[in-house]
Image: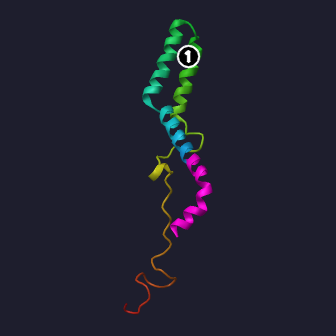
Amino acid sequence: MDILWTLLTLPYAPVRGLTALVKVVAREAESRQYNPVNIRRELEELDRAAAAGDITPEERDRGQQQVLDRLTRPAAGGSRVPPGRNGAPRRPAPARRGTGGRRGEPRGGRGGGR
């Protein structure tokens, strides 16, 4: 069965590969965007440019605010929830409905003594 499934889905292999590549690139871009070293470097570049007279103090303040907003605001795709397994977002646990398997029966199943 596995061989048959592999043969049937073989034409979709490039799509799966491209999807995996896009996920890796997106994860790397996000990690660089929120990396403390890169943030500090951006803030230092703004300070250096303001000290050299390349930008005005107002432009420096605006740039610093943009960097800090990027840290405090949620990502564009929604809230920043730590990923679960394989980088997928965590899902809430399903709500439990009752105690038994069937309606009206106690938890332990039907009473047959099995």
Tell me the residue at 48%/61% (across/down).
93
- Label 1 belongs to which residue? 60
Asked if residue 84 shows in the view, the reply is no
Judge by depth and name the residue closer to the eye, 12 or 84: 12
Local packing at callout 1 (Cα closer than 10 Å; few below 14, some 14-19, many 20+) is many
Q: What x and y, as percent, mark residue 7?
A: 58, 62
* Residue 105 against residue 8 in the figure, above or below: below
Tell me the residue at 55%/16% (across/down).
60
Q: What kind of residue is marked 1? A: Arg
Q: What x and y, as percent, mark residue 41?
A: 46, 21
Segment tinted magenta in the rendering = 1-19
> Is the magenta region chiefly helix, strand or loop?
helix
State the colouring used for the structure image: rainbow
Q: What x and y, as percent, mark residue 96?
A: 48, 69
* Residue 92 against residue 14 in the figure, above or below: below
Which residue appears farthest toward the bottom when viewing the image? 112
Q: What x and y, as percent, mark residue 54?
A: 57, 9
Tell me the residue at 55%/18% (across/down).
61
Asked if residue 100 shows in the view, the reply is yes
